[in-house]
Amino acid sequence: MRLSSFAGLGFLILTSPVAAESVVQRDHVVVSYEGVNETHAAAVAKVVDSARAAAAKLGFDMPKTITVNVATRLTGGAGLFNDGDRGIFLTVRSEKDFRKPADSGVFVVYGLCHEVGHLAMYRAIRERRWMTTAAAEGWAHYLGSRLVDAVHAAEGEALWPDKYDYREDGTKRLKRQREDARPSPTVRGAGLWADFVEAVGDRGVVETFAAWGKATIDPADPAKGLGAALPKGEAVRKWWTTAGPVFVAKSAVSPFAMKTAKPADLAGKPRELAHDDGTSAGKRSIAGAGPAVAFDAPDGEWYLTTVRVFGSRYGTAEAPEEKFIVFLLDDKHRRIAEFPIAYAKFDRGAPEWVELEITPTLVPGKFVVGVDFQPSARKGVFVHHDAEAGGSSTTGIPGREFRKFANGDWMIRAKVDRVMGGK
């Protein structure tokens, strides 16, 4: 999130791992930092430790230890993001960003509470591709506002080195925002979550998140499975009637009928479709989106058999047990098929071409292939791109907006083949 605009949602774009030098510790928080003084790092640790304790008291699953990385970045604004599990990453331009918001325009105390709110949701709901910004950011804004109040009750105004009444950034502010005639999607989402808590209580939310984390979600109609996992009752049913369309992003299904073939039925003379020039000019990992490339199929009926990606995995030595998704879309970004692939396909270290074999699937004349790694700062794949953008590369995932990628062409290629005796 952008710390100067708490209602905004910024994409996490990583080009290299985050590092820091010095460390401050509390019972359940470890803060590593560089470029800022120990006083501010210690204050960050207090905020996160107190917010974690408050969230755990409400019943949310909190990590035993939250790690916080604080670093300076001379260009761009201050920012915060999380790894969806136990890590928070704060970047500031200078020590000035730790001044009270009235002077700096940066809401560090609130922002840290906001990220703890994200962890309360994300640790329970690992599969979140169906979730809109209003749902995810709205929840973090709602719980984060409550955590600000809880931190103040536990630590007092003396917590922050540049003293100010940070309660003004808690539920007081949320109440004012909800009264606005045209609330932002984040504020509207926060209001809907507040209504849900009023209906089922904090324990009901904890149980709902756990149920959603275990539910089988149809990407074409996520609301059905999510609604079935909600607590029973007329009040919840009415709430979901309003909240469901705001919180759930549907993935439009292509009218192009999905058709597969057996590998043994293929001619064994694949063609590789590519737009990149084979020379890397950079690499990216983008949270909330995925690299995608549009292709034109040769004349006739062709089946997508393999997606080739030039990249390497980052994060823990052992590959995550979860799977990422290769998606096949039509030229209007409507879903034709999705294919789960093991993260272990990618190694750490030097980038290389990795072949992702899928069930041979018929493609239309124009189609899009992309990959959703659901990355974080601790887990993901750096996908490389060349230097010159040809217009075929985008970032996005099914159900979300696709944006042109202007930094080059993604080094993602598609292999297609015909069936024996096919057209």
Image (cartoon, rainbow, N blue to C red):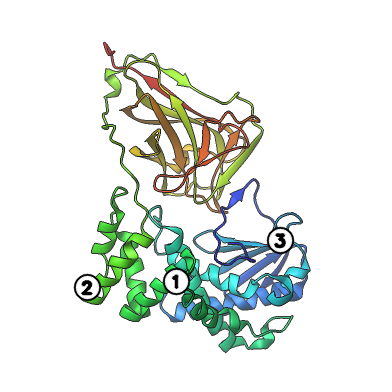
Alpha carbon distance from label 3 to label 2: 46 Å
Judge depth for marks 3 and 1 and give the one in front. Answer: 1
Q: Secondary structure at mark 2?
A: loop
What residue type is disc 1 on? Ala
Precedes in sequence: disc 3 or disc 1: 3
Classify residue 83 as left or right of residue 240. right
| Residue receiving disc 1 | 190
Precedes in sequence: disc 2 or disc 1: 1
Q: Quadrant of the N terminus?
A: bottom right
Categorize mark 1 by other alpha carbons within 10 Å: few (<14), some (14-19), many (20+): many
Task: Say the numbered circle drawn on residue 232.
Answer: 2
Q: Residue at x 44, y 45 (%)?
A: 397
3 and 2 marks in contact (CB < 8 Å): no
Alpha carbon distance from label 3 to label 1: 29 Å
Residue 25 visible within the image: yes
| Residue receiving disc 3 | 71
Alpha carbon distance from label 2 to label 1: 22 Å
What residue type is disc 2 on? Lys
2 and 1 marks in contact (CB < 8 Å): no
Q: Residue at x 32, y 14 (%)?
A: 267
Q: Residue at x 64, y 61 (%)?
A: 79
